[in-house]
Image (cartoon, rainbow, N blue to C red):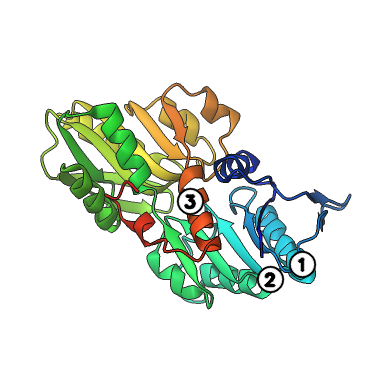
């Protein structure tokens, strides 16, 4: 059984970078639309008995990209692939991981069911919004962390400078604490009150940030309101600078313009979601690649080796 990598359309550059890391060409496949926008997938080489990894983030346009993934999984299943792994760097619908009110869905679970029913035998993803989403799948699920990639970049950029790692809300403390520990840095927390969906108000900073370079850490930046408000509060509290390291740059609506005009020295995201032209043109925004991380995970899964060291924030292996 040999290994094949297939890409849908949501993030072709990331798939090509993973292919380059693994020194393995992408599988020939036609992923396109009919005139009425129905998704059509044709695998143009033999996959019978093969170990196939499908790379597809379910980012905007979320429903189109999710449908591409589902149809691709079905095509591979009907092509008699031996094992199919859905590599989903950004898992859309992850913020709908529980009932937020009466008669509301748990869409993250619904999407997990769809992916499994379509033919996936395994899922690989990155920094799920909520860790318990792994339990929504009845198939093996590896949730990798971007923290080791961030750790290396922060060390390279800041060296021995005085740092404080900041969680933009109480819910992200575990993520921020782990990164702070790996960098031997202090931890601060921003206590905010959300008045309504998509709008946040910074209330208090827990911890000392004065005369330090502040590093905000979170899994998703969408509207950018939380980050920009946090940056203003940290600078007002005496921070030397504020940068943000975010796993998934959703950046919807006017988020890019908001970040460009904010006190943020830099917003760093992974390439789990393909960068827009506006992001590429912004001087205080950049992406760092998770292709080596995902490529290494794919290699180890294909060879039935342990991937546990990839979950270790401080491991440089």
Q: Are marks 1 and 2 in contact (CB under 8 Å)?
A: yes
Q: Is residue 40 visible?
A: no
Q: Tell me what residue is drawn at x 29 percent, y 50 percent.
A: 315
Viewer-closest of 291 and 126: 291
Question: Of callouts 1 and 2, which one flags the residue occurring earlier in the amino acid sequence?
Answer: 1
Q: Tell me what residue is drawn at x 48 percent, y 51 percent.
A: 296
Classed neighbour count for the residue bearing mark 1: other residues with Cα under 10 Å, few (<14), some (14–19), many (≥20): some
The percent coordinates of residue 2 (x first, y second) are 66, 60
- Residue 311, image quadrant: bottom left
- How many angstroms separate mark 3 from mark 1 (CA)? 24 Å
Question: Of callouts 3 and 1, which one flags the residue occurring earlier in the amino acid sequence?
Answer: 1
- How many angstroms separate mark 1 from mark 2 (CA)? 7 Å
- How many angstroms separate mark 2 from mark 3 (CA)? 21 Å
Q: Tell me what residue is drawn at x 43 percent, y 39 percent.
A: 269
Left or right: 293 with respect to 312? right
Q: Is residue 186 visible?
A: yes
Disc on res. 296: 3
Left or right: 78 with respect to 215? right
Q: Which residue is mark 2?
A: 82
Above-or-below relation of 31 to 225: below
Disc on res. 48: 1
Question: Residue farthest to the right?
Answer: 35
Left or right: 216 with respect to 287? left
Classed neighbour count for the residue bearing mark 2: other residues with Cα under 10 Å, few (<14), some (14–19), many (≥20): some
Above-or-below relation of 193 to 49: above
The percent coordinates of residue 287 (x first, y second) are 46, 34
Q: Tell me what residue is drawn at x 44 percent, y 61 percent.
A: 143
Q: What count of labels does the image hold?
A: 3
Question: Of callouts 2 and 3, which one flags the residue occurring earlier in the amino acid sequence?
Answer: 2
């Amino acid at each position: 059984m040999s290994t094949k990598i297939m890409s849908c359309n949501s993030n072709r550059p990331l798939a090509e970078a993973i292919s380059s890391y693994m020194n393995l060409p992408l599988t020939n496949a036609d992923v396109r639309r009919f005139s009425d926008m129905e998704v059509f997938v044709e695998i143009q080489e033999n996959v019978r008995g093969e170990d196939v990894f499908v790379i597809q983030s379910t980012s905007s346009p979320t429903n189109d990209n999710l449908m591409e993934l589902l149809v691709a999984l079905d095509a591979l299943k009907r092509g008699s692939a031996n094992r199919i792994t859905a590599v989903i760097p950004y898992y859309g619908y992850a913020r709908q991981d529980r009932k937020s009110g009466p008669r509301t869905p748990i869409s993250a679970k619904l999407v997990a069911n769809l992916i499994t029913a379509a033919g996936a035998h395994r899922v690989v993803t990155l920094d799920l919004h909520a860790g318990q989403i792994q339990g929504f799948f009845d198939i093996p699920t590896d949730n990798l962390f971007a923290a080791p990639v961030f750790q290396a970049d922060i060390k390279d950029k800041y060296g021995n400078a005085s740092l404080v790692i900041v969680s933009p809300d109480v819910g992200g403390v575990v993520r921020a604490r782990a990164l702070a520990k790996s960098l031997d840095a202090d931890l601060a927390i921003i206590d905010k009150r959300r008045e309504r969906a998509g709008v946040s108000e910074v209330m208090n900073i827990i911890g000392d940030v004065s005369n330090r370079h502040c590093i905000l850490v979170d899994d998703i930046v969408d509207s950018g309101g939380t980050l920009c408000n946090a940056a203003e509060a940290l600078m007002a509290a005496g921070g030397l600078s504020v940068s943000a390291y975010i796993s998934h740059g959703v950046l919807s609506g006017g988020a890019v313009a908001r970040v460009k005009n904010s006190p943020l020295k830099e917003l760093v995201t992974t390439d789990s979601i393909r960068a827009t032209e506006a992001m590429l043109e912004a001087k205080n925004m950049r992406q760092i690649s998770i292709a080596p991380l995902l490529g290494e995970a794919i290699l180890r899964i294909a060879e039935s080796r342990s991937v546990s060291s990839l979950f270790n924030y401080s491991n440089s292996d």
